Image (cartoon, helix red, strand yellow):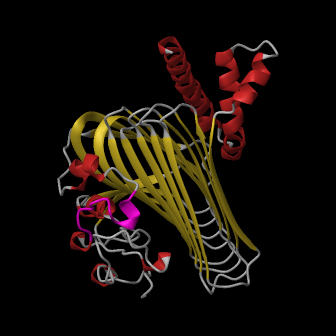
Amino acid sequence: MTAVTPEMGKADKATLSGDHSHGAAIPDQSRAERRKSFDLGAFGVPSGREEEWRFTPVDRLSPLLAEKQTDPEAVTVTVTGEGFESGTLAEGEAPRGTVLVPSDRGSVLASSLTPNADHVVIPAEAELATPVRIAVDGKGGDKRANAHLVIEAKQHSKALVILEHTGSAQVTANVEIVTGDGTDLTVVTVQRWEDDALHLAEHDALVGRDARYRHIAVTLGGGIVRMNSNVRYAGPGGEATLLGVYFADSGQHLEHRSFIDHNAPNCTSLVTYKGALQGETARTVWVGDVLIRAEAEGIETYELNRNLVLTDGARADSVPNLEIETGEIEGAGHASSTGRFDDEQLFYLQARGIPEDEARRLVVRGFFADIVNKIGVAEVVEPLMEAIDEELAATAALVESAGAEA
C-alpha cells in the first residue's frame, strides 16, 4: 500500500482505495489497508454488513449518509478563550488535508461539504492560561450540519481545547489535529446532545517529535454518536493518550473507535475507555485498533476497555485489536471486559447502613474513578461527575419502577 504523506495532492490521496467490497463483512488483512480517500465515490452507502459498520444501526443514520448541504440554521458555534489565532482554510489549503484523509462516508461528506474549515492555531512557544472553548449548539433534530475543524499547535506550545456539543442536529464532523515538535496539547470533545441528535465524527491527529497529545471523549447524549479517533506520529518520542467515558440510556447508540498507527520509533500510546449502560435498548460499541509497523522499534502501547451493565437488556460490544510487525518493542497489550452491576458490592454497602440509591452511586463512581483521575482536567471532571450523578438518578428510577412492576 502507498503511504499517505503531507506532500501528496488531493488527487493522489483519492486513489488510495484498493479493491474492497462494500457488501461483505470481510476484515482487511491489515488495518493499514483500510480505504482512505477524499472521493465520495470511494465510499458507498453502508448496508451494515461491512466490517467497519457491522455494529452500527445504519438504517437510523440514513439522513447523515446522504449528500446534503449544511442548513445555516442547524447549529450555532461560539469560540472563546485567549492567546490563540483563528481563521479558515479552503479545501487543499495546508495544513487542512495533510493529516485527515477521510476513512468512511460520514467523514468524506464532512470534508467535501465544508468549503471553509475553521482553523484554530496555538502559536509557537505559547502556554495558554485558559482553555480554548468551542461550543456547538444544535437548533433542530432534522437540520443538517457538516463541519471540518483544524487545530494546529505549533512547536513547544501548551494548550487545552474543549469542543462541546449540545442541543440537537444531524452532524457530520471532522477534527484534524496537528501538533508541532515538543508540544503539549489536550483536546476534549464532549457530546451532551439531546436524545434525537445524530453525530458522525472523525478526529485524526499527527503527533510531533517529542510531543505530548491527549484526546478525551466524553459522550453522554445523542440518539446515535459514532466517533473515530485516530493517531499517527511525525517523529520519534511522541506520546499519545486517548481517554473515553460514556453512559448510554435506553434508545442510545454510542460508538467509539480508535486507531493508533505506530509508524515511528520510541513512541508511546495509552488508550483507556470506560462506559456504563442502562435501559433495555441501550447500546455501546468500542473498537480499538493498534498497528505497530516494522519501523516502530522501541514503542510501548496498551489499550483497555471496561463496560458496566446496570440493567437488563443493555448491550456492550468491545473489540480490541493489536497488529505487530516488529518484535523490537518495549511492550504491547490490550484488555476488555463487560460485566453486570455487582449486587454483592451493593449488599456490602447497604449492610453498613448506606441507602440503596447512594450505594449504587458509590459503586458506579468507583468504576469511573481511575479514568476520571487520568483526565485530571477540572473543567471536564466536575461537569462530568455531575452528569454521571444525573444518569444514576435515572438508574434509580428505572430500578424502582422495575421493582414496583415485579
Query: As displayed, is residue 390 above or below residue 249?
Result: above
* Residue 163 is a magenta residue: no
Residue lying furthest front in this view? 406
Q: Nearer the viewer, residue 392 or 405?
A: 405
Snapshot quadrant of residue 282:
top left
Q: State the image coordinates of residue 281 (x, y, percent, origin top left).
A: 41, 36
Q: Position of residue 105 (x, y in %)?
A: 29, 63
| Residue 355 drawn above or below residue 24 | above
- Is 129 on the left or on the right of 107, as rendered? right
Left or right of 316 in this view: 236: right
Q: Residue at x 75, y 29 (%)?
A: 345
Q: Quadrant of residue 332?
A: bottom right
Tell me where the magenta segment starts and ends, as one range.
43-54
Question: Could you tell me which residue is drawn at 64 percent across and 17 percent down?
Answer: 357
* Viewer-nearest residue: 195 or 192: 195
Q: Residue at x 45, y 42 (%)?
A: 283
Q: Position of residue 336 (x, y in %)?
A: 63, 55
Left or right placement of residue 8 versus residue 204 in this view? left
Say which residue appears at 49% left-offset and 38% top-offset: 314
Is 391 drawn above or below residue 162 in the view shown?
above
In what quadrant of the picture does the N terminus appear? bottom left
Q: For this rendering, which residue is in front, 92 or 35?
A: 35
Does the magenta segment cover residue 44? yes
Q: Position of residue 65 (x, y in %)?
A: 24, 55
Magenta residues, dominant SS class: loop
Along the line of sight, the residue nearer the viewer: 127 or 352: 352
Asked whether residue 81 is in view, the answer is no
